[in-house]
């Protein structure tokens, strides 16, 4: 018979000591081997010191952190059920130039996991221009060309808008585009209430990005107000205004400033709409916020949470209801940190960004294809990007948790501090008259430029890492694919379609009727503006004709200094192009007897060479040789390395025999005084034009080393961009 089972006593955690904050700090200091605790504190571009450890005491006084999802101030999400009841929408952008090509891609992607339409327009369409009034290189670049109801029908053929929400990046042409969309639904026998999603009207965002508007701000606000009032009465699930943070984020802004600019833009819209009779409870729910999602994982989560908290505070100050205080959020992985070199690394970048967006609580999300920086996405890159979201939903089970970050001491504390920093920046903008005036004064541009300059310096000195660009470069990489779209042919095709539309070979009187409708629209009172525009579009008026009619007798159009979009990798990509151009112009090639494989020979031919004069055994030179190899591979150089030479004479002979125009000496500070002078002398005698670089920069030896012929030094903290560019120039002059 079995022995009776003895009951285990319950675990009593009180028998373990309760470490205090001082205990944790002391344990951390002990692990640092004499270094100060501050080494564990991370300084952020937002001016926040991110601590290595957060405890309950850090969030004890944060009232918002004690709220529940779906309740004001919506810190923990705008919906009570979060993604558990309704997963975020997979809203991948599609940038095909022709309506038919867009439709083919859209229908395929909707059948393979996409759940929302994200329609990008080309620049002429966003500005309200017909394609035959645009420049050939503009039509179809970066988005679909739409100008007529027939174009809309072709783009949305077979799509049920009542079941699939649609976002249109409308630029400054939201009202004319709404007229085309509504006219399409009327022709199809569908109610305009089918429209769900967002028709993104964001004049201040366009102004920040492009530096000019094709209409006055007052007229832009007039159109925004009429569009919003129409939607409230006819398409209640359609948002009609947007606040894009893309220009600010991609221009280099930190998260606190990005939030401040978003708030200031939203406030500008609420004020302008209020002056035009649009109540805050109508306006606020119809403004969507589109956030760029960057690489700083926890900061991006905190940014999305802080945005909801701050917007609720703003709308409440305007007298908005609890429901109106709920922020609509869309996320898009940022462009700033994407590369054309080693582009497959972008797949990893967007995965962490998408995870941050999902944990942060966006309602819809676009994950950029890995080749976005180089060319329009193909079916493969679209599929990989789309599947990132599906994996997060279906395999990582993020749809099984309502608020994944809720209760995290680190996230809650960071959210609070970020919100406070953003509010201070917001107040500074308000003190300058609001967002429009801050842009006109150049205040926003100068603030962003200062942060962008710090980012660029840290990347150049490789304190910040961009894999494949400023660290871990792939020297055997072939040039990235480029955009091979025939935009001239697309322009001719679209221009011919517009000519046919206007002449109406089958009904010459049709376009005359459309023009008569336009005349009626110009004379119509504001409250009938949208309905009259829809009638004109249904009669055949084009996007350009509608836009011109709306803007008769418009006032002065604003211009500012635009915010530049400079991807972080561009200086390094420019180095690679320079190196490749230098090599091809000099006709460098390896002899046929080279022991290298064809792939390796191709790599040699594709870049100028640098020879590493490694002195002594590996333990003496390897650390600096590895550093030097990585340093110059970033610049596109083919680095010739070895296991070390026993003496300077042997190293010099090998360096000269390599034919490399530049030599990097790698050893230790202690050996340099004895080894460098004879090595440099031997190289100079055989190849006087050789550029000689030293790995390391021993301060007490610099003058002596320069005196014997060392041209430059590379070291931890050196400007990788400047020194690689210097070497390219030095080689090209020889």
Image: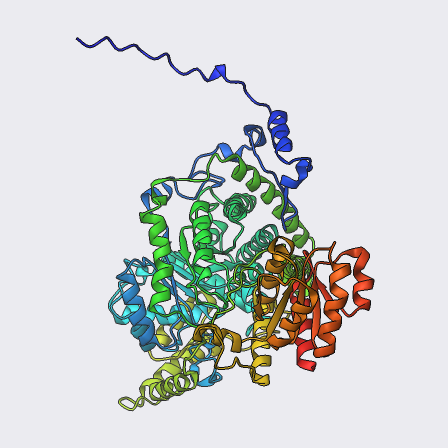
The residue that appears at 40% across and 72% down in the rendered structure is 533
The x and y percentages for residue 396 are 35, 45
Answer above or below: position of 533 versus 270. below
Kindly tell me whether residue 345 is visible in this rendering.
yes
The x and y percentages for residue 145 are 40, 76
Q: Who is closer to the viewer here, 343 or 281?
A: 343
The x and y percentages for residue 730 are 70, 76
Quadrant housing the N terminus: top left
Relative to 671, 373 lies left or right: left
Answer above or below: position of 248 versus 490. above
The residue that appears at 55% across and 45% down in the rendered structure is 310
Relative to 409, 533 lies left or right: left
Q: Who is closer to the viewer here, 690 or 575?
A: 690
Relative to 79, 214 lies left or right: right
Answer above or below: position of 59 versus 204. above
Q: Who is closer to the viewer here, 135 or 671?
A: 671
């Amino acid at each position: 018979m079995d022995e009776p089972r003895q009951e285990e006593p319950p675990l009593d955690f009180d028998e373990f000591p309760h470490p205090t904050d001082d205990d944790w700090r002391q344990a951390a200091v002990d692990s640092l081997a004499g270094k100060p605790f501050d080494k564990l504190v991370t300084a952020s571009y937002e001016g926040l010191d991110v601590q290595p450890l957060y405890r309950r005491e850090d969030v004890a006084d944060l009232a918002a952190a004690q709220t529940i999802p779906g309740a004001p101030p919506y810190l923990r999400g705008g919906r009570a059920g979060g993604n558990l009841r309704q997963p975020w929408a997979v809203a991948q952008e599609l940038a095909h130039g022709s309506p038919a090509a867009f439709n083919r891609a859209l229908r395929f992607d909707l059948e393979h996991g996409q759940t929302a339409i994200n329609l990008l327009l080309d620049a002429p369409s966003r500005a309200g221009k017909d394609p035959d009034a645009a420049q050939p290189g503009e039509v179809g670049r970066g988005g679909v060309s739409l100008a007529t109801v027939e174009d809309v029908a072709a783009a949305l053929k077979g799509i049920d808008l009542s079941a699939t929400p649609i976002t249109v990046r409308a630029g400054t042409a939201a009202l004319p585009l709404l007229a085309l969309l509504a006219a399409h639904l009327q022709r199809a026998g569908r109610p305009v209430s089918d429209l769900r999603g967002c028709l993104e009207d964001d004049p201040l965002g366009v102004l920040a990005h492009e530096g000019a508007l094709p209409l006055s701000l007052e007229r832009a606000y007039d159109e925004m107000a009429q569009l919003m009032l129409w939607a409230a009465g006819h398409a209640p699930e359609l948002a009609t205004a947007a606040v894009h943070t893309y220009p600010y984020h991609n221009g280099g802004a930190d998260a606190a400033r990005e939030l401040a600019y978003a708030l200031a833009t939203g406030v500008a819209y609420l004020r302008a709409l209020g002056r035009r009779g649009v109540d805050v409870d109508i306006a606020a729910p119809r403004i969507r916020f589109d956030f760029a999602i960057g690489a700083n994982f926890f900061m991006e989560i905190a940014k999305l949470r802080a945005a909801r908290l701050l917007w609720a505070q703003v709308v409440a100050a305007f007298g908005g209801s609890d429901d109106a205080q709920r922020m609509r959020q869309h996320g898009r992985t940022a462009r700033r940190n994407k590369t054309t070199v080693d582009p497959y690394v972008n797949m990893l970048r967007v995965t962490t960004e998408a995870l941050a967006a999902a944990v942060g609580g966006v309602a819809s999300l676009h994950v950029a294809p890995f080749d976005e920086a180089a060319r329009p996405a193909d079916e493969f890159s679209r599929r990989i990007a789309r599947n990132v979201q599906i994996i997060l939903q279906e395999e990582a089970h993020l749809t099984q948790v309502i608020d994944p970050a809720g209760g995290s001491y680190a996230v809650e504390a960071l959210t609070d501090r970020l919100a406070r920093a953003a509010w201070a920046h917001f107040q500074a903008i308000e003190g300058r008259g609001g967002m429009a005036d801050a842009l006109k004064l150049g205040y926003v541009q100068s603030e962003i430029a200062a942060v962008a300059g710090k980012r660029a310096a840290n990347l150049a000195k490789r304190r910040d890492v961009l894999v494949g660009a400023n660290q871990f470069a792939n020297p055997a990489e072939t040039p990235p694919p480029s955009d091979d779209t025939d935009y001239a042919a697309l322009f001719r095709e679209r221009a011919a379609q517009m000519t046919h539309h206007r002449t109406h070979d089958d009904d010459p009187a049709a376009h005359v009727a459309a023009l008569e409708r336009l005349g009626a629209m110009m004379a119509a009172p504001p409250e009938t503006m949208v309905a009259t525009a829809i009638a004109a579009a249904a009669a055949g008026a084009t996007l350009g004709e509608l836009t011109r009619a709306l803007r008769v007798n418009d006032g002065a159009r604003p211009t500012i200094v635009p915010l530049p979009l400079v991807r972080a990798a561009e200086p390094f990509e420019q180095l690679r192009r320079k190196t490749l151009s230098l090599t091809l112009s000099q006709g460098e090639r390896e002899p046929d007897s080279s022991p290298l494989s064809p792939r390796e020979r191709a790599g040699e031919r594709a870049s100028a060479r640098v020879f590493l004069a490694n002195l002594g055994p590996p333990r003496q030179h390897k650390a600096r040789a590895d550093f030097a190899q990585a340093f110059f591979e970033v610049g596109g150089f083919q680095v010739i390395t070895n296991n070390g030479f026993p003496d300077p004479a042997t190293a010099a002979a090998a360096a000269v025999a390599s034919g490399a125009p530049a030599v990097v000496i790698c050893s230790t500070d202690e050996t340099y005084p004895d080894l460098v002078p004879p090595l440099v002398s031997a190289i100079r005698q055989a190849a006087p034009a050789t550029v000689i670089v030293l790995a390391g920069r021993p301060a007490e030896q610099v003058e002596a080393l320069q005196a014997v012929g060392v041209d430059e030094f590379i070291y931890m903290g050196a400007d990788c961009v400047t020194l690689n560019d210097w070497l390219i120039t030095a080689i090209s002059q020889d």
